[in-house]
Amino acid sequence: MKKPILDKGVNEKSAQLRGKRVAVGASGGIGAVGLVKVFRELRRHGAQVSPFATPSVFKFITPLSLSWAADHPVVREPDESVEHFEEFDLVVVAPATLNTLAKCASGITDNAVTLLVAAAVGGGIPIVVVPTMNMRLLRHPMYEQSRRILESWGVEFFQTPTEEDRLKMPAAEVLVPFLIDKIVCK
């Protein structure tokens, strides 16, 4: 197997996240194209980023792009081995589709992201979810039901204002400071 091409060249902005491990689970939405910037911005603050992905995310972005930006290979298959579930300081699900949220709220662990969330819930690791979807999906009863269940388990939602009748993936410059606060202030 070839070694992944990794990005070693980020300029550090701060050491706020030095030594901190952030797992980012990406589900299949167009917002996934913004993850390269999110991963690099987290790394600029010292974080070690571990990307997890559902199979559908690769319709929008390549595994190479995610692993390059994270400087870490993408976890693509559900695998209960401990090497993937070390103690993370934070788990982020972004973009989070209705499908992924419903599976997480139902305890379904049929892909790497839903298994990551289940392990984080069971391990008491802080979780931030960034929902991205159109308003029809947002209004589906399963969205609100899933949100209530996940919030009752301590999951926090970072929801941007609707734009063009959609919840869109926030810019890295908006999302990363929020994530830094979640880690630094926990």
Image: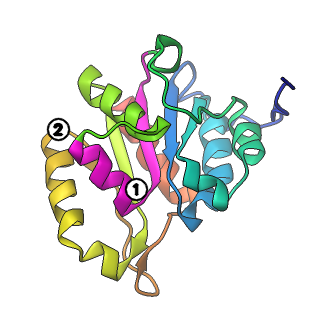
The crowd level at tag 2 (other Cα within 10 Å; few <14, some 14-19, many 20+) is: some
- The quarter holding residue 60 reads bottom right
Q: Is 95 included in the stretch rendered in magenta?
A: yes
The crowd level at tag 1 (other Cα within 10 Å; few <14, some 14-19, many 20+) is: many
Q: Secondary structure at mark 1?
A: strand
- The quarter holding residue 155 reads top left
Q: Residue at x 25, y 24 (%)?
A: 122
Number of marks drawn: 2
Q: Which mark is first along the chain, 1 or 2? A: 1
Q: Residue at x 21, y 56 (%)?
A: 147
| Magenta stretch, residue numbers | 87-106
Q: Secondary structure at mark 2?
A: loop
Where 74 falls versus 64 (above or below)? above
Q: Residue at x 33, y 28 (%)?
A: 120
Provide residue 62's location: percent of width, then percent of height: 73, 51
Q: Between residues 171 and 149, which one lies in front from this camera angle? A: 149
Q: CA distance from mark 2 to mark 1?
A: 16 Å
Provide residue 90's location: percent of width, then percent of height: 41, 32
- Label disc, if present, on residue 153 of the rendered structure: 2
Name the outermost residue toward the front: 110
Q: Residue at x 51, y 23 (%)?
A: 20
Q: Amino acid at mark 1?
A: Val
- Label disc, if present, on residue 130 of the rendered structure: 1
Where 48 falls versus 169 (above or below)? above
Q: Quadrant of the N terminus?
A: top right
Q: Is 156 included in the stretch rendered in magenta?
A: no
